[in-house]
Amino acid sequence: QGHLVESGGDFVQPGGSLRLSCAASRYTLDYYAIGWSRHAPGKEREIFSCISSGDGSTYYADSVKGRFTVSRDYANNTVYLQMANLKPEDTGLYSCAAGDNYYCIGHVPVGSLDWGQGTQVTVSS
């Protein structure tokens, strides 16, 4: 499918909120599960969320459950990640990727994942 493009990253204080966007220009996201991940220096990439196509079911890792919400905007071919109550440990480069199929296994899209270049989120006081 090719890379998706992320945007919306910023510097925010603990407890703050941000909304990230994940968009595609060359194909429709409607038919694919979309995953979000983050990568902090010195840590492994963490895939923390997946939204399926069809019924739009969402799945989250425990680290973000209750604070992050993923949604689809079909009209704009965009997937959003709404983040609330941000913590310093949420700092990282946030990326999205489309799976090879419409569904998720847990909070991970099915198939090989081609992560975008990402958008930086920094949570600090």
Image (spheres, rainbow, N blue to C red):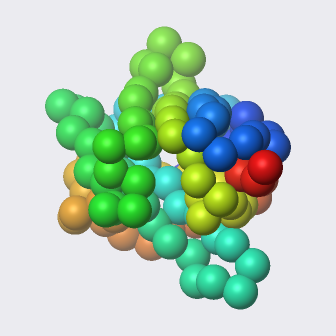
In the image, 17 versus 13, the foreground residue is: 13
Total of numbered circles in the picture? Answer: 0
Q: State which quadrant residue 63 falls in.
A: bottom left
> Which residue is at the far front?
125
Task: Tell whether 47 sits left or right of 96.
Answer: left
Q: Is residue 46 above or below residue 77?
A: below
Q: Position of residue 69 (x, y in %)?
A: 40, 36
In the image, 29 versus 49, the foreground residue is: 49
Q: Position of residue 98 (x, y in %)?
A: 47, 53
Q: Position of residue 78 (x, y in %)?
A: 54, 28
Task: Tell whether 26 sits left or right of 46.
Answer: right
Q: State which quadrant residue 90 falls in.
A: bottom right
> Which residue is at the far top?
75
Q: Residue at x 81, y 43 (%)?
A: 11
Q: Residue at x 51, y 36 (%)?
A: 84
Q: Is residue 75 above or below residue 47?
A: above
In the image, 58 versus 42, the foreground residue is: 42
Q: Position of residue 123 (x, y in %)?
A: 72, 51
Asked whether residue 22 appears in the rendered view, the answer is no
Q: Residue at x 50, y 71 (%)?
A: 46
Q: Residue at x 71, y 86 (%)?
A: 42
Asked whether residue 43 appears in the rendered view, the answer is yes
